[in-house]
Amino acid sequence: MLFGKTIAALSLTTALVMPMIGAIPAAYAETPPNMLVVAHRIDDLISLDPQEMFEFSGTDYANSVYQTLVDYDDLDFSKGFGPSIASSWEISEDGKTYTFKIAEGLKFASGNPVTAKDVEFSLRRAILLKKTPSFILTQFGFTEENLDETLVAKDDSTFVLVSDKKYAPSFVLNCMTSAIASIVDSKLVMEHEVDGDLGNAWLKTNSAGSGAFKLTSWKPNESLTIEANPNFSEGAPAMKRVIIRHIPESASQRLLLEKGDVDIARNLTPEDVAGLSGNEDVKVLTDMRGRIMYISMNQSDEILSNPKVVEAIKYLIDYEGMADSFLKGQYVVHQAFLPLSYLGELQDKPFKLDIEKAKALLAEAGYADGFDVEFIVRTEQDRLDIAQALQNNFAQVGINASIVQGTGKETLGKYRARDFQIYVGAWGPDYPDPQTNADTFTHNPDNSIEAKLTGKLAWRNAWAAEGFTERTEAAVQESDTAKRAEMYVQLQKDFQKEAPFAIMFQKTEQNGLGASVEGYSMGAAITGSYYGKVTK
């Protein structure tokens, strides 16, 4: 197996195309040259309304069908956000008023012009619908009662956003790239409004965007088809049609890819990736994703609240061993709460498996003979494998760990109720800004049980996060992006030393591609996939 060129457009050095050279399968068909066929698990889709969807597959869809005020270059995320529907913007001296100029000549797929009124309608709609992802916008102080003052189209080409207080501009603008900030065709949507639903029922199964594609059909748990938008401002995409087929099994995806029946296989296991080796008709794209794998220790527990015990446990984890064995190809070692590629990323990895050091720390803590402890683990193979590996290492220092499996609902229920000792968990960012993870890992303004701040991992672990909470609030208001990034770096360094969390891994994803497929972006760690620039 040879490693090919790094995809220069992607910001992460792990984004590689690996051509598979060697044996050739017996028969290789081809999809039409202007059609992209994708095998993917899309059973998480429950709505195609961009102001409602909050699923992985939904973000893929929004990236293809809708535009936002600002957006990323999907082939070079290192540039950060840039103009999209907004051609430019200004920020007032007090940092609370953002004035966006709308680019000229933009059209929705319907042919209707894109105006500031559509921006006003879309962002207000997100607040009024009150769907799950609405917090991404309401955190700036927008409420149903103040929309006439906070989200306002001054004319067809000027849109003004007024936040409740000064925030870091990078925070505000990063949130404007999220799916819920997609701009919809207000005229078309309101033609389908029923009983004041702002077109929600209709938009669940229809599209009204100005992105590269428009929706043709969605058959839940079967397929999603989108076709080129001839009015797209960047020019109609080369792929006239993209068909995403719901193929949940990795082996089936691999077979279809090898036969040439699909162009991209999105959910391959390490075994099936390895099985593609030697096939010159396919290649594998590897990219970092935003998912973080960690364990955390409940600070309500007398033993686990001992800082020496917390530190010892961080040295009882065989980070490299797990990443190189049963997690190979799925995760890389990562020990900071921000995913790599995020503003303020920290690459330091201060912990490694060190049994003797752990023994010494436990002796200092008064637990030289170990203790009994319980893991709660979602019944998911990678988490169970991690828990078992930890169980073995813990045993070497006298810690008798038991593993209690459960469904996601069961384990999350105990986690959110603080009814656990050690939790084996995963966390994915909600929006592409460092605040998304900082807010959950290091912000806990009220650690009382009555506060029930269940959305914050610090609270779930009964960790008061004293000092961290204040620093997190300061970072999200810092206007200087370089200073802001450094604040998150320092926050993470101290978090590594003090917090009752052991961050272990960051997700990597491997997609199989037909050899001729170019211009496909997995979205790196910050967003979903893009199909708009694919060629074959």
Image (cartoon, rainbow, N blue to C red):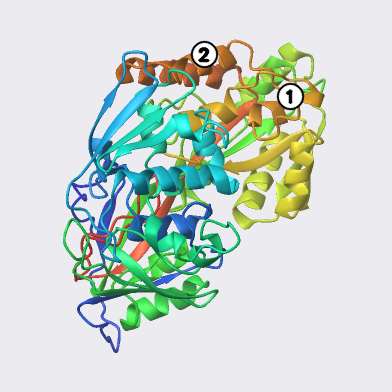
Asked whether the viewer can see residue 338, the reply is: yes
Q: Which mark is residue 471?
A: 2
Label 2: element kind:
helix
In this rendering, the answer to whether 64 lies above or below 409 is below
Give amino acid for label 2: Arg
Give amino acid for label 1: Ala
Q: Are marks 1 and 2 in contact (CB under 8 Å)?
A: no
* Residue density around tag 2, few if under 14, some if 14–19, many if 20 or more, within 10 Å: some
Q: Earlier in the sequence, mark 1 or mark 2?
A: 1
Instruction: Say which quarter of the image contains residue 187.
Output: bottom left
Label 1: element kind:
loop
In this rendering, the answer to whether 469 lies above or below 212 is above
Residue 174 image point, x, y percent:
38, 35
Give the residue pinned by disc 1.
462
Instruction: Say which quarter of the image contains residue 407.
Output: bottom right
Residue 510 image point, x, y percent:
39, 58
Q: In screen coordinates, is 357 left or right of 191?
A: right
Viewer-proximal residue, 533 or 463? 533
In this rendering, the answer to whether 346 lies above or below 385 is above
Residue 168 image point, x, y percent:
39, 21
* Residue density around tag 1, few if under 14, some if 14–19, many if 20 or more, within 10 Å: many
Q: Nearer the viewer, mark 1 or mark 2?
A: 2
Residue 146 image point, x, y percent:
53, 31
| Residue at 35% in and 46% down | 117
- C-alpha span from label 1 to label 2: 18 Å
In this rendering, the answer to whether 535 lies above or below 470 is below
Viewer-proximal residue, 11 or 534? 534
Viewer-proximal residue, 323 or 152? 152
Asked whether the viewer can see residue 337, the reply is: no
The quadrant the C terminus occupies is bottom left
Seen as rendered, the residue at the extreme bottom is: 27
Instruction: Say which quarter of the image contains residue 394.
Output: top right
